[in-house]
Image: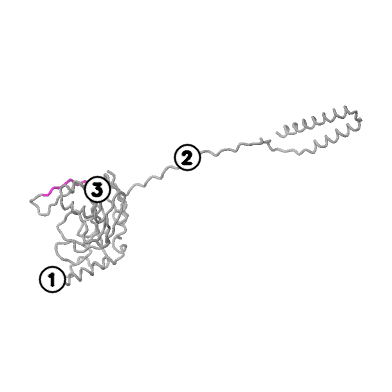
């Protein structure tokens, strides 16, 4: 391309020279003047700088960047547990494995005093639960709520109570729902909190039940979550053992002469102290931390 540039410039100069020579001849200039003019033009040609740069157009088109593909949306990670239409995540310290089973509907049999109606439900079981010794077995149940209300007045009452609580969310409710029906009274209730999950919400609390007065203890205290989907189709009920370092192992050290057995005043005083203590312990000081259970129920997804 260098050669083409030089040839182009030489052509321009020679054309100019030819025009000047024609003018000189036309005007009758002398031969010496012509030679001097030729010498000057040759000198100008020699002084033209040589370059390797490509000639460019006056308006060079800027190259356009290649179009980039739109980033694909990040896929949701698989849940730690999935069974039928239920999925959730759980901390690895709680259990080595969760597994589900389908429990058929149970209608009460008049031959058994403690046979209560239960709708068909999913039962979630825990292998190697963090607490190995406890009166209660760790379990989560997911009921078909509409059918449960059709066969159980107790279910109707508790689901209605839960709906009322979730609408107002009082800090210290007088009554709390509990399903399934069990033949025992709730003596201690503490650590009440409301929890939301995708498509629903519920309430959690600590509880100890019994058929007779008994001191609070690590063999009987449990965490329960009672929740419902926003569409009213499914009810979630959990019973999960908990311990605390400040509590008795099983309460047996109280013996048969424990004063609250026989004195209403002593019982009321003891009960108030227990509730104050249970509420005063930080959630993470329990074994396992109540916050791990909370996170598990926040992760619940029910997709029929």
Report the span colored magenta.
Answer: 101-108
- Label annotation for residue 232: 3
Q: Give the mark, 2 or 3, whose residue is nearer the N terminus.
A: 2
> Relative to residue 96, is residue 258 depicted above or below?
below
Alpha carbons under labels 2 and 1: distance apart: 77 Å
Q: Secondary structure at mark 1?
A: loop
Alpha carbons under labels 3 and 1: distance apart: 44 Å
**Residue 273 appears in which quarter of the rendering?**
bottom left
Q: Give the mark, 2 or 1, whose residue is nearer the N terminus.
A: 2
Check disc 2 and report the residue beneath it. 69
- In the image, residue 264 lies at what x, y percent? 15, 70
Q: Give the mark, 3 or 1, whose residue is nearer the N terminus.
A: 3
> Relative to residue 14, is residue 272 depicted above or below?
below
**Residue 185 appears in which quarter of the rendering?**
bottom left
Q: Nearer the viewer, residue 143 or 82?
A: 143
> Relative to residue 120, is residue 95 depicted above or below?
below
Check disc 1 and report the residue beneath it. 262
- In the image, residue 22 lies at what x, y percent? 85, 27
- In the image, residue 211 lies at what x, y percent? 14, 62
Q: Residues within 10 Å of mark 2 (few under 14, many from 20)?
A: few
Quadrant (top left, top right, bottom left, bottom right) of the C terminus: top left
Residue 170 counted in the magenta span: no
Is residue 129 visible in this depiction of the protein? no
Q: Are marks 2 and 3 in contact (CB under 8 Å)?
A: no
Image-based side of 66 in relation to 58, left or right: left
Q: Nearer the viewer, mark 2 or mark 3?
A: 3
Q: Nearer the viewer, mark 3 or mark 1?
A: 3
Q: Residues within 10 Å of mark 3 (few under 14, many from 20)?
A: few
Q: Secondary structure at mark 3?
A: loop
Q: Nearer the viewer, residue 200 or 206?
A: 200
């Amino acid at each position: 391309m260098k050669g083409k540039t030089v040839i182009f410039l030489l052509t321009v100069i020679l054309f100019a020279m030819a025009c000047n020579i024609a003018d000189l001849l036309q005007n009758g200039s002398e031969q010496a003047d012509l030679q001097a003019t030729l010498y000057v033009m040759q000198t100008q040609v020699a002084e033209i700088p040589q370059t390797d740069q490509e000639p460019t157009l006056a308006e060079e088109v800027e190259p356009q960047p290649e179009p980039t593909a739109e980033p694909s949306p990040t896929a949701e990670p698989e849940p730690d547990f999935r069974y039928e239409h239920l999925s959730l995540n759980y901390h690895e310290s709680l259990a080595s494995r969760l597994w589900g089973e389908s429990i058929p509907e149970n209608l009460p049999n008049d031959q058994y005093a403690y046979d209560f109606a239960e709708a068909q439900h999913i039962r979630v079981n825990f292998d190697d639960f963090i607490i190995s010794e406890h009166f209660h077995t760790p379990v989560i149940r997911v009921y078909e709520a509409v059918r449960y209300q059709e066969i159980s007045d107790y279910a109707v009452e508790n689901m209605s109570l839960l709906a009322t609580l979730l609408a107002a969310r009082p800090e210290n409710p007088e009554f709390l729902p509990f399903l399934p029906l069990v033949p025992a009274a709730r003596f201690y209730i503490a650590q009440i909190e409301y929890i939301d999950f995708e498509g629903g919400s519920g309430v959690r609390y600590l509880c100890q039940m019994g058929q007779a007065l008994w001191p609070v203890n690590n063999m009987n205290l449990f965490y329960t979550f009672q929740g419902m989907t926003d569409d009213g189709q499914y009810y979630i009920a959990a019973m999960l053992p908990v311990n605390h370092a400040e509590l008795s192992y099983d309460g047996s050290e109280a013996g048969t002469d424990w004063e609250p057995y026989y004195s209403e005043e002593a019982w009321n005083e003891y009960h108030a102290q227990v509730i104050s203590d249970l509420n005063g312990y930080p959630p993470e000081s329990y074994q396992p931390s109540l916050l791990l259970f909370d996170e598990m129920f926040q992760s619940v997804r029910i997709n029929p």
